[in-house]
Amino acid sequence: MMSCSARLAKIWLKEPLLHFLFLGVMLFAAYQWFGNHAEDPAKATREITVSQGRIHSLTETFARLWNRSPTQEELDGLIRDYVREEVMYREALALGLDRDDAIVRRRLQQKLEFLSDDLAMTGEPTEQELDEFLTQHPESFRRETRLTFSQVFLNPERRGASLEADTTQLLAKLNAQSSTLDLISLSDSRMLDPRLDEASQSEVQEKIYDLVWSGDRKLSADGKLPVVGNTVDVANATWTNTIGDPELITVWKDPSFDAAQRAFYYARVIEIPIPRWTAYDAKKFGLTLPKEVPMTTTERAYTSPIWYTPGKEQQ
């Protein structure tokens, strides 16, 4: 006959509550064991490592955009922006902002499709395929003509009526002693470098368009725009804003745009004439300066360049 204690033990072993408590204790023990041996996720997300590879990527991206390497100050700013972006990205993930977002889902889909297409095209081309491609696209592999030259720029607005005489005199001087002249000192200031070495033909081709201007002036038959005028009172070193416009807006499309040709664009804004520092000095000190000394100047502003590079479908 079964004893009372045996019957109680059998009843307890069949009790579902006992089974539930046992499983709970086991799960709690397992969680404590593996949790103590795993890296703390919160701690892992506190550290952001900016590797040399990442710095190189930031530098290359800047160089492709601005066509030059960043300065140390600019590079420090790029790194700060990257760290801030990484902090915001991790915080967004922690808050679950990536979930149930149609834009994020679409972007992930596009990236997966891009990777799939890229993997499908990883096969190495044969020599015959390379030869055929070269025959069909010779312009993509032809090197441009390289040019080395110095340029002397004479500013029409600064020289005014003496431009033609100055040009003739300077040309005669250059033809007579081109090897001994300091070309930089002969040139008026401008944005472009006075000398180019081994520059490609596309780098030295430049066209200037008058896009928008003040007043009712019209372009002449040869494409030149009349000067805006001059309100400078040289004797008193003053001027008035009775000419020009405070704001100019237009939309422009390059009439000679070639989708297969590299190009860059920048805008130049020219203000109305104002007194030059020589006029201020003459007024302040009561000086009478020689006629050849410029007494007015025209301030200019240049935008950052916009670079265009043909895509694969145009090359």
Image (cartoon, rainbow, N blue to C red):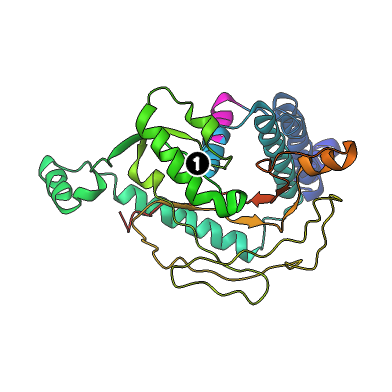
Residue 72 visible in the current orientation: yes
**Which portion, as a residue range, is magenta?**
51-57
Instruction: Tell me if 111 is positioned left or right of 281 in this view.
Output: left
**Position of residue 112 measured from the top left corner of the image (x, y, whole percent):** 46, 54
Residue 9, above or below 297: above
Instruction: Indicate whether residue 152 is drawn in magenta.
Output: no
Residue 173 location, quadrant? top left
**Few, some or many residues within 10 Å of mark 1 (<14, 14–19, 20+):** few
Instruction: Tell me if 268 is positioned left or right of 207 in this view.
Output: right
**Position of residue 315 measured from the top left corner of the image (x, y, whole percent):** 30, 53
Mark 1, residue position:
64
**Position of residue 154 measured from the top left corner of the image (x, y, whole percent):** 52, 45
* Nearest the eye: 58 or 192: 192
Mark 1 lies on a secondary structure that is helix
Residue 123, above or below 101: above
* Nearest the eye: 246 or 105: 246
What is the quadrant of the N terminus in the image?
top right
